[in-house]
Amino acid sequence: MNSMAQIFGVPESRHPLKDKFMGWQCRVRQLAMREHMGRPDDAIRPVLTLAGEEKPFGRITTVISKGMLHSKTPELQHMVKRTFDTAQRREKAIEFFSETYYQRQSEFSEILTATFPPKSSNVTRILDAGTCSLDFEAYSHRFELACEVRALDAGHPLYQATWWHNLLFNPDLHPETTVLAFKPDWENSTSEPAT
């Protein structure tokens, strides 16, 4: 069973906007690793607006993860466990993500994830809303994604991929971190320039 079916009960989507967005995400994330030492920018940190609200909730930092058939979670775990030197760990992570990790967009799950502190009132608000929009705007592109939101169990493959990815860059990541999954509804999402 793939990750989409496990979380949302539906198969991966086939949509031109999905292909355009995922290709753009792979490019901007590789750029962030190669030219900005992994620091996330607006292409990775969308503005989140809850369903039924006009005022933005705020920015969140998103992760895209390889699908289960192409998972690199064991490699991420190895990098974390190999050394306690956080600078060396970060350096190895940037090298790993800069090389070929983002080369094939088809290997990635369309579900975006983000971490939040445990027992956060923000998580409660987001989950209570159930849906939201994620507005990405950078490098002359804009994507407004209508998304369904779910919390992931710690054992879920996308939770694990997100956890180990973020631990490479944030050694103070709380062990009970909450990971939310954002599944885009491509039919009700938009892009500029249009597809």
Image: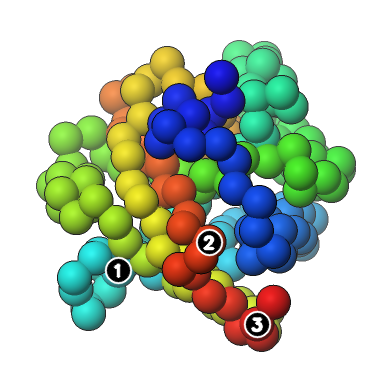
Q: Which badge, 2 or 3, comes first in the chain's sequence?
A: 2
Horizontal side of 161 relative to 99 (left or right) equals left
* Residue type at the position of mark 3: Ala
How many residues crowd around disc 2 within 10 Å: few (fewer than 14), some, or many (20 or more)?
Answer: some
How much space separates mark 3 and mark 1, taking CA atoms? Answer: 21 Å
**Front residue of 140 and 77:** 140
Please name the amino acid that badge 1 sits on. Answer: Thr
Dot 2: element:
helix
User: Residue under circle 2?
Assistant: 186
CB atoms of marks 3 and 1 within 8 Å:
no
What's the amino acid at mark 2?
Answer: Trp
Image-based side of 143 in relation to 49, left or right: right
Residue shown at the point (49%, 29%) measured from the top left: 5
Residue at x 33%, y 47% (from the top left corner)? 149
Image x and y of residue 155, in percent: 42, 16
Q: CA distance from mark 2 to mark 3?
A: 13 Å
Residue 55: in sight, yes or no? Answer: yes
* Mark number displayed over residue 170: none
Among numbered discs 1 and 2, the one appearing first in the sequence: 1
Q: CA distance from mark 1 to mark 2?
A: 17 Å
For mark 1, give the secondary structure: strand
User: Are discs 1 and 2 less than 8 Å apart at CB?
Assistant: no
Q: Nearer the viewer, mark 3 or mark 1?
A: 3
Circle 3 residue? 194
Mark 1 — residue? 49
Residue at x 64% of width, y 24% of height: 68
